[in-house]
Image (spheres, grey):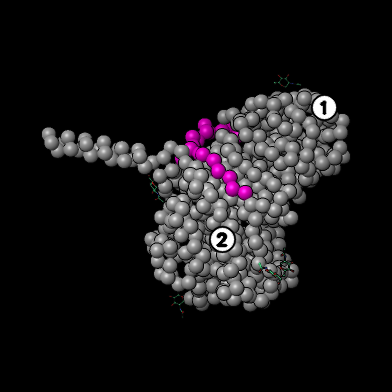
Amino acid sequence: MISSQLLAYVAILVFCTFQAHSLETFIAAVYEHAVILPNATLTPVSREEALPLMNRNLDLLEGAITSAAKQGAHIIVTPEDGVYGWNFSRDTLYPYLEDIPDPAVNWIPCNNPDRFGHTPVQERLSCLAKDNSIYVVANIGDKKPCNASDPECPPDGRYQYNTDVVFDAQGKLVARYHKQNLFMGEDQFNAPKEPEVVTFNTTFGKFGIFTCFDILFYNPAVTLVTDFQVDTILFPTAWMNVLPHLSAIEFHSAWAMGMGVNFLASNIHYPSMKMTGSGIYAPDSPRAFHYDMKTEEGKLLLSQLDSHPHHPAVVNWTSFASGVKTLSTGNQEFNSTVFFDEFTFLELTEVTGNYTVCQKALCCHLSYKMSEKRSDEVYALGAFDGLHTVEGSYYLQVCTLLKCRTTDLHTCGDSVETASTRFDTFSLSGTFGTQHVFPEVLLSEIQLAPGEFQVSSDGRLFSLQPPSGPVLTVTLYGRLYEKDQVSDASSDLTARALRVMLIVLIPVGFSLSWTD
Ligand SMILES: *[C@@H]1O[C@H](CO)[C@@H](O)[C@H](O)[C@H]1NC(C)=O
Ligand SMILES: *[C@@H]1O[C@H](CO)[C@@H](O)[C@H](O)[C@H]1NC(C)=O
Ligand SMILES: *[C@@H]1O[C@H](CO)[C@@H](O)[C@H](O)[C@H]1NC(C)=O
Ligand SMILES: *[C@@H]1O[C@H](CO)[C@@H](O)[C@H](O)[C@H]1NC(C)=O
Ligand SMILES: *[C@@H]1O[C@H](CO)[C@@H](O)[C@H](O)[C@H]1NC(C)=O
Ligand SMILES: *[C@@H]1O[C@H](CO)[C@@H](O)[C@H](O)[C@H]1NC(C)=O
Ligand SMILES: *[C@@H]1O[C@H](CO)[C@@H](O)[C@H](O)[C@H]1NC(C)=O
């Protein structure tokens, strides 16, 4: 009797404790950081010279971290390359690296700074987290010595990794992620032999982490969501904006919606290299975003998010479009290039209409109504079904409504930042061969349209109200990850020939990084 009462009491206690400690919402912060770059150099600086530069950047990050904590943030994300910048060879990067241990060692660098050698950057980040009682996410460089016992050991006897680290509110290292999908020219780093899937639990949900170019590929990005069911993605990035489909705020918010997760994107602020665009995105809508090509200043964003966002009903991305009966508009199709890919387009010649355009297996269907059909602006509906092979190799299926740069149809797909045409309604769908489709809406002057559109379970991206600004693009950006690898023998040969060509070409073009 007593013991069962006691048990009930304990159960209630445990339940209450659990209730008290698990949060339904939390406050997220991301910092767009105007990074201070080191002076370009052919010969490595000393460790003593590397530290002051990193500390100058950490001073700026400290300002953002303390300000975020004062405003109640539980976690703050800072950008890729935010501590030491870029434009390094393997050798000139080396003085900026620290040995970062596996978080399983259970280490609070702030309390025990000498446990793993000389690690002042980790110590400072850990103390910033501990002293401000906030999770701190940063991107720094890891070095791991290797030798001939490892056949893949680089000739200089070490691996160098582009690394995200997370310190919890006690300053403990709780996550370490080595970037998998390095961007072209990122030769100062090695990719890990196997993709690392890094997650950690908090009282405000389960977190996953990956970096910049990783967002275009299956591993580890999609795996974190589909196999590990994380609630929130942490995303340090140094993202160069590419219109019409790969501007940072546009694509990152689309990934959050397409995958049904919270997404905390922290970009570098460096307008002369088109790096700006950070945000806090929930699956239903962006909560905060920042895009600024005009000033040189960093920017702190904060917003409240659900700890466990509702995953939207599963979308069948081909259901609606495959039932559409195509009527010819009589308009002539034309080809035009969008970021090196040749799309098939149809011009929207009327103020309202139903249009279909197809390429290979993909048919895209658009119903729309403009407020007025202007004579000084041309819009087109485009389809692309193919392998993109420029700065990376990734298979796309894309349906897009976009504003052409001029009234010349050959400019459809060129970068354009302003528009004047307002739409009353739009509904875009396509016969996608994938469940991984990212819905984008971008308005004039690179603005998002929070709460103004939705995706239906039969795969339509449609407006809920007339968009608040003129439209630059409405796009369904689909990825067919399984077709990234060219499979047939002849393409295999081409790919091998290309790789050989690259291996021959790269040392000529980037001789700096091959001086070891
Ligand atoms: C780069 O060099 C200039 C001139 O020598 C110096 O004034 C500046 O502080 C250096 N910048 C960094 C980040 O070291
Ligand atoms: C990168 O470094 C090279 C040589 O070290 C230099 O010529 C070039 O100007 C640098 N680029 C930037 C963007 O700093
Ligand atoms: C080579 O590396 C292995 C594994 O990291 C290590 O156990 C071994 O001691 C190293 N050998 C030498 C000669 O340094
Ligand atoms: C997070 O918590 C879940 C259950 O609450 C557990 O299954 C999982 O292993 C935990 N993950 C980590 C990384 O601790
Ligand atoms: C999606 O819809 C299409 C067309 O209605 C149907 O053929 C297909 O089976 C559906 N796919 C799934 C996974 O339900
Ligand atoms: C568009 O390009 C495709 C090949 O990508 C070609 O077959 C087709 O004829 C072109 N159409 C026009 C109108 O030029
Ligand atoms: C487009 O299709 C919808 C539904 O199929 C129809 O109600 C509408 O009248 C059509 N609009 C035009 C301009 O043809």
Q: Is residue 40 left or right of residue 171?
A: right
Task: Determine if residue 179 is in view.
Answer: no
Position of residue 53 measured from the top left corner of the image (x, y, whole percent): 61, 67
Kindly identify the residue that appears in the image at 17 percent across and 34 percent down: 5
Q: Residue 80: image x %, image y %?
A: 59, 57
Disc 2 residue type?
Answer: Leu
Q: Secondary structure at mark 1?
A: loop
Quarter of the picture containing the C terminus is: bottom right
Disc 1: which residue: 373
User: Mark 1 near ligand 7 (CB under 8 Å)?
Assistant: no
Indicate if the residue with disc 2 has its beta carbon within 8 Å of ligand 1.
no
Q: Position of residue 294 (x, y in %)?
A: 73, 48
Q: Earlier in the sequence, mark 1 or mark 2?
A: 2
The percent position of residue 369, horizontal first and vertical second, equals 75, 25
Can the viewer see residue 444?
Answer: yes
Q: Residues within 10 Å of mark 1 (few under 14, many from 20)?
A: some
Amino acid type for the residue under numbered disc 1 = Lys
* Nearest the eye: 240 or 190: 240
Q: Give the magenta-colored segment's residue range.
A: 299-317
Q: Is residue 268 above or below residue 452?
A: below
Question: Camera-side residue: 111 or 141?
Answer: 111
Give the residue number, with chain letter if any, for mark 2: 58
Q: Work out whether residue 29 or residue 499 is closer to the camera in this orientation and state it.
A: 29
Q: Is residue 468 left or right of residue 329?
A: left
Q: Quadrant of residue 162?
A: bottom right
Q: Residue at x 77, y 26 (%)?
A: 370
